[in-house]
Image (spheres, grey):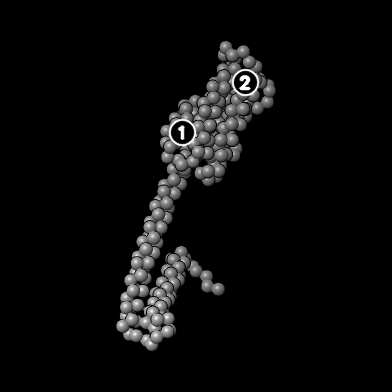
Amino acid sequence: MTVLSSPRECIAETLEVKNWRSVLGMLGGIIAVVIVSAYGATSLGKKPYDPSLMASWVQAVGSIATILGAIFVGRTQSEAQHKSALEVQHAALRRRWATVKALLDPLYQQCIDIENAFDGDHDFGNLSFALRYDSTAFEEALDRLRSIPLFELDSDVLVTSIIGVGDSARSLKMWIVEGQRRALGKPTGLDASDAQVKDVARDQLARIKKHYAAAVMVVGGKPITAPRPLWQYAP
């Protein structure tokens, strides 16, 4: 068994196989022309061989073969061009999808960084949001997400996921602000307990996780799965 050491050798072997196939195809075509012409020159074996008929049959069969060959070559070239165009489109699409994940990840990371602040049914503590939330960084991440040209993504699942993450993150931001005010003992004007606020925030976080997972299924790459430790936090 031959082991190829590089992609170049693989390509060379593929080209060699294609060249042999081309040669065999040409030889087969020539043999077919000769056989058909010979049958025609003898009127399918019913008459003696006639050189003039042989020449006419060779010319006729050759003309037909030329036409068929031109059709085949044209179709092959068209298919190759179409395949090449699709590969270019797919490469561009993969780059756009990679950009989408690069914009989704920072916002998603900030969302799950703050998740622990909404754990349990007890009241918010003074340090519930300490070092875990930066409003400026959060809003900037939302703005970058809004800048994604959704109509260029060619994926309804991805578009739905981006919109879902953005909408739920904006809603989560409202509940973060509510929780911050409660943690500092400031009035909020909302007639709800801390446990109820946490419950609504957890619902938004669940939605964000669902949409993010759906987006990663489309674009690929390593997903974010856990909040950062406090000592790693940097907006």
Q: Residue at x 60, y 25 (%)?
A: 201
> Where is residue 232 shown, x and y percent of the image?
55, 36
The residue positioned farthest toward the front in the image shown = 46
Residue 213 visible, this orientation:
yes
Q: Residue at x 42, y 81 (%)?
A: 44
Is residue 26 positioned above or below 194 on the image? Answer: below
Q: Secondary structure at mark 1?
A: helix
Residue under the point 54% across and 22% down? 174
| Closer to the camera in the image, 73 or 137 | 73
Tag 1 residue: 145
Question: Hey, what amino acid is under mark 2?
Answer: Val
Give, as a three-letter code, the residue at label 1. Leu
Q: Which label number is shown at residue 197?
A: 2
Q: Earlier in the sequence, mark 2 or mark 1?
A: 1
Tell me the residue at 33%/74% (across/down): 60
Left of 45 or right of it: where is 190? Answer: right
